Image (cartoon, grey):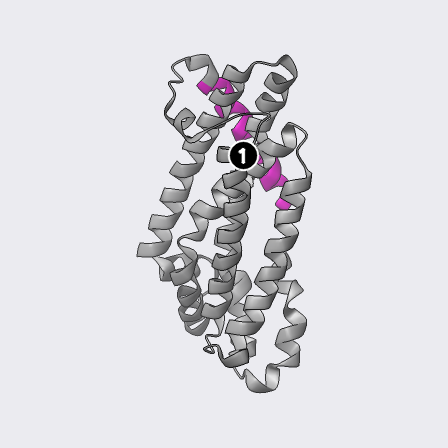
Amino acid sequence: MFLFFGYFPFLSFNSGHFPEIDLFISAYPVANQFIMVFQICCMGIGMGASVLTSRFWGMKNQEALRKSITIMLRICLGFALLFSLVTFFAPEAIMRIYTTDPEIIREGARYFKWAVPCYLLLGLSLTSTIVLRSVGQVRLPLISSIFAFIINIFFNYLFIFGNFGAPRMGIEGSALSTLIARIVEFSVICVYLFFVDTKIRYRLHHFFMRCRDSAWRIGWFGLAFTRILDLCATEN
């Protein structure tokens, strides 16, 4: 939603060349409500994991730290797959949850067509960002977020209105711009965590490590679920 207000001045400035602006302004925030649900889930998962990662980081227990990240990533991938499938197969049904206007539903479904890959990218980058911050690495997530925001603004201006010779895509251009920004943010955050980071030293092969201890899963799920409820209560 913050991104929407970020490029709202561009919409106003180009309203003469964008007659569907009212429909766009109506459909975009409605479609993003469903994506916001996924984002809240990922924030709860990441914050639940951060309680454990910060603890094990302080204890210098690298094995336990990596286990908590592994469980976090697996759950995040499960959520991303679920939301992606629902969005891919039933975009109009999702829109009907929030509105009965057929034009807004149709416009929102166009947005969802490009949003499907964003769940995986958003989920992994968001949860990984929270983990990095929990061990004191805050600069890279901040820089990547600012950079992704600027990229989103630029490509929105490019694709929504068809500036500089780009195709005029309307709300689909907004979704494509978000996808590009997510790819950039994912590339920076996840490449750093999986290949460069020297503090946690979490690598891709750790994703397949065994986490048999049932106490891990019960405690972790409890923390994540509590965080999700807290975030939902805050949103309401």
Q: Which stretch appears magenta? A: 217-236
Q: Is residue 145 magenta?
A: no
- Image height of 40 relative to 87, above or below: above
**Residue 32 drawn at (x, y percent):** 52, 57
Using the image as rendered, state which of residue 75 and residue 57 is in the foreground. 57
Name which residue lies at 48% across and 25% down: 221
Left or right, residue 140 beside residue 192: right
Using the image as rendered, state which of residue 179 and residue 40 is in the foreground. 179
Using the image as rendered, state which of residue 39 and residue 212 is in the foreground. 212
Q: Which residue is mark 1?
A: 196
Which quadrant would residue 209 be assigned to in this image?
Answer: top left
> Is most of the magenta stretch helix, strand or loop?
helix
Secondary structure category for the residue under label 1: helix
Name which residue lies at 65% across and 78% down: 12
- Image height of 21 relative to 110, above or below: below
- Position of the N terminus, as image quadrant, is bottom right
Name which residue lies at 68% across and 37% down: 138
User: What kind of residue is marked 1?
Assistant: Val
Residue farthest to the bottom, as pictured: 16
Q: In this figure, what is the number of numbered marks?
A: 1
Left or right, residue 5 beside residue 193: right
